[in-house]
Amino acid sequence: MDGGAAAAPGRSGVGAYAQVGGEETSRALPVAVSATAAGVPAQRAGEVDAATELEMARRWADEADRYAQQAEVLAQRPALLPTWSPMARAVAVYLGFAAVSVLLMLVMVLASGVGVVGGWTLYSWMCAGLPAVSLIGAWLVLGRWGRPAVGAATPPRYPVIGFLLCFLAVPLAYCGYLILVRTMR
């Protein structure tokens, strides 16, 4: 039984590659096949009008310029709410984060009602913690996704509006919750 190349180390003529000057010299190198023989059609021998070709090249260049201008305009828009104005975008982001803080505050109020969260913890998170977290989160989102890919380095974030929206939304929502609960009783 023959074990192949691994069974006969050092034996000549055994291996993955042919030996130089051995029996492989009788083989010829592969012949290159022409494009037409491979099934590729040959170029037509029709007349080429230089003026038509130049006009087509000019049209393609103009179209490429239009696409480049469109890409430049799109790159100057931010990824977050691209058609909105910077002020409307900032207000929407701050209100979104404030709404999440209001929902967390309502969960904490319900947890306070069953004794899981103490009153001091509830009031400190309601007046300072949740509004600060929502303001910082919205600030970071506006800085990251409110900036265009090309153009202005720092987008307008409107910190005063953000402070007012975030720090007034949670306490006012709590007051509204208290008024709602007291009137329902």
Image (cartoon, grey):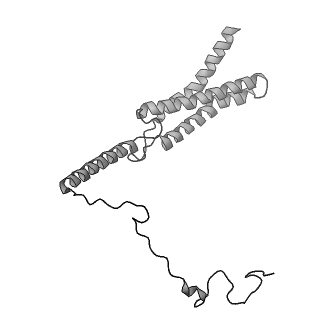
Vertical comparison of 22 with 137: above or below: below
Q: Where residue 31 sits: x, y (%)?
A: 46, 76
Quadrant of image for the C terminus:
top right
**85 or 67: which is nearer to us?**
67
- Answer left or right for 157 relative to 58: right
**118 or 82: which is nearer to us?**
82
Q: How many marks?
A: 0
Q: Where residue 61 sits: x, y (%)?
A: 27, 51
Vertical comparison of 94 with 73: above or below: above
The residue furthest left is: 51
- Answer left or right for 92 relative to 83: right
- Answer left or right for 61 relative to 33: left
Residue name at image x 67 percent, y 83 percent: 15
**126 or 69: which is nearer to us?**
69
Q: Where residue 170 sits: x, y (%)?
A: 60, 26
Q: Where residue 148 sits: x, y (%)?
A: 42, 44
Quadrant of image for the N terminus:
bottom right
Residue name at image x 61 percent, y 30 percent: 100
Q: Quadrant of residue 166?
A: top right
